Amino acid sequence: MRTTSIGELEELILLVVGALKNSVYAQTIQEELLSHANRKIDITAIHTVLRRLETKGLIDSELGGISKVRGGRSKRFVKLTVKGRNLLDQSILIKMEFYKRLLNNHS
C-alpha cells in the first residue's frame, strides 16, 4: 500500500484545518498561519494546496452561500477527513520519536 506524503506547507495547512474544525476557508487559514506560525502565505498558494489536499483525500470541501461582499462569489469551506487526521497523527508520532532521540543524544 502506498502512503500519502505531504510537504511542510501542506502539513501546516492541514493542521490549521483540523485545529479550527468549523467554517475554515482560505482567508481564515491565511490569517491563522500569519498569527500563529508567523508565515505570510499568498492566498493563491493556499488555494493550490487546498486543491492538492482534497485530491489526496485529506480534506473535503463544500461551497457556502453567495455573498455580495465577495462580489457574488461563494466561499469554499474545508474540513479534515479521517484520512487527513490519520496522516497528521502518523506524522507527529514519527517527529516525536526522532525528537526524543535528539534529546537523548544531547543530554
Image: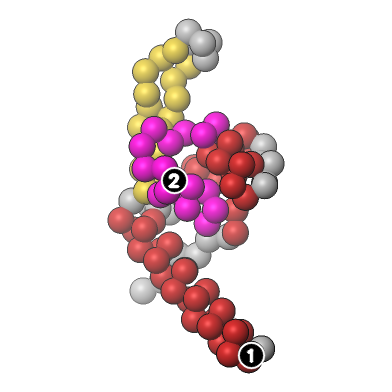
- Mark 2 lies on residue: 17
Residue 26: x, y in percent?
A: 52, 34
Query: Looking at the rendered structure, which numbered label has been put on residue 107?
Result: 1
- Residue 23 colored magenta? yes
Mark 2 or 1, closer to the camera: 1
Nearer to the camera, 49 or 101: 101
Q: Quadrant of the C terminus?
A: bottom right
Tell me the crowding category of disc 2: few under 14, some 14 to 19, or many 20 or more residues within 10 angstroms, Cα based: many
Magenta stretch, main secondary structure, is: helix
Query: Looking at the rendered structure, which numbered label has been put on residue 73?
Result: none
User: Residue at (52%, 14%) from the top-left corner?
Assistant: 70
Image: 42 above or below 57: above
Q: Is residue 16 visible?
A: yes
Of marks 2 and 1, which one's residue comes earlier in the chain?
Answer: 2
User: Residue at (52%, 57%) from the top-left corner?
Assistant: 11
Nearer to the camera, 61 or 105: 105
- Residue 3 colored magenta? no
Q: Quadrant of the N terminus?
A: bottom left
**Which residues fall within the magenta stretch?**
10-28
User: Residue at (51%, 11%) from the top-left corner?
Assistant: 69
Q: CA distance from mark 2 to mark 1?
A: 35 Å
